[in-house]
Image (cartoon, grey):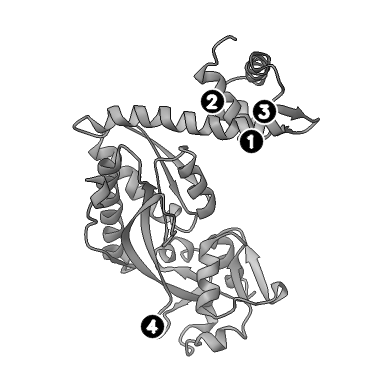
Amino acid sequence: MTNLTLKQLRYFEALARHNHFGRAADACAISQPAISVQIRELEETLGTELFQRGPRQVRLTNFGEEFALRVRDILRSVDELTDLARASRDRLVGRLRIGVIPTIAPYLLPAIIGNLARMHDGLDIHVRETQTQKLIQELADGRLDAAIVALPVSEASLTEIVLFAENFVLVRPGEDEGKPVPNREMLREMRLLLLEEGHCFRDQALSFCNMHSVRPRELLDGSSLSTLVQMVGAGVGVTLIPEMAVPVETRSAAVSIAHFANPQPSRTIGMIWRKTSPIAKQLLLISEVVRQAAEALRAQHGSASVAQPPKLPAAAQ
């Protein structure tokens, strides 16, 4: 049997993830015919089909699903070998793949990326913005080095570092400026605009309002905080957003901001990575850059309560 190549395995993993030759080719920065040839050669080497091909997408065969599990383990191990070499250097260099949830990315990322670029000129930063569960899965698969999310995630395989906490604020139409701030019981009677299913910020807002069993028609869903705020400005309802989002999202909307009485709704933001990551110490340094960026944002806008500098977990020392 001809030896399998890492290139073939990476192309296979991309196709298994995207279920589409064109999207997999784009992800690998090659042409669609080229990835098709590589996958066909891989199947010929193995003597069996890995994918069921359809007119619009492809699906893994039963063997392909089993093969995919082994391939992900192999690729993760190969990436960790590279990380071992990076960990031995005095400074951070090479590729850094970091994930961020959408309710943090637009507000904190510019400062984080700028600071990292100034401090580590050899760092090639790749950012992935998506929901928490996808980030956790991509961390487990080795496609990300770290992620900035709302804590806790409670995954035994991941290290969690608390960075800062921030409150949520109420966004109301501009004409409501100065009116009494509704409590959570009153909020349940209002038309509440929330992010669509899958966003952890949605679950946190529902928890504050004690609306776990709310009927879908009582709410209106949006795909971004920007959409929600603009809808409030149009008089559709009210919404909750994290304080760090206020300067960006309210600057062009006819809305007013109100703070809830204590105890205020809030969230804890942190950074997570695999406990087995060889670059855990470097990631801890990066988490401190994130913490400092949040502190600067708080000082500028009064938006977040920043935790003490994180300490390296004993397992990573």
At label 1, which amino acid type do we have?
Answer: His
For residue 213, which numbered disc appears in the image?
none
Q: Identify which residue is drawn at 59% across, 68% down.
A: 194
Considering only order in the chain, which callout, 2 or 4, is on the residue closer to the N terminus?
2
Residue 65 or 204: which is nearer the viewer?
A: 65
**SS at mark 2?**
helix
**Residue 65 in the figure: left or right of residue 98:** right
Rendered position, 126 above or below 316: above
Q: Identify which residue is drawn at 69% across, 16% down.
A: 47
Q: Identify which residue is drawn at 26% across, 34% down.
A: 92
**SS at mark 4?**
loop
Rendered position, 14 above or below 206: above
10 Å neighbourhood of mark 3: few (<14), some, or many (≥20)?
some
Residue 142 locus on image (x, y percent): 45, 37
**SS at mark 3?**
helix
For residue 22, which numbered disc appears in the image?
3
Which residue of the protein is positioned furthest toward the left in this rendering?
Answer: 90
What's the CA distance linking mark 3 and mark 1? 9 Å
At label 4, which amino acid type do we have?
Answer: Pro
At label 2, which amino acid type do we have?
Answer: Arg
10 Å neighbourhood of mark 1: few (<14), some, or many (≥20)?
some
**Closer mark to the observer between disc 2 and disc 1:** 2
What's the CA distance linking mark 4 and mark 3? 50 Å
Residue at image mark 1 = 18
Considering only order in the chain, which callout, 3 or 4, is on the residue closer to the N terminus?
3
Which residue of the protein is positioned furthest toward the top in this rendering?
Answer: 2
For residue 263, which numbered disc appears in the image?
4
At label 3, which amino acid type do we have?
Answer: Gly
Residue 134 locus on image (x, y percent): 54, 49
Q: Identify which residue is drawn at 29% across, 50% down.
A: 287
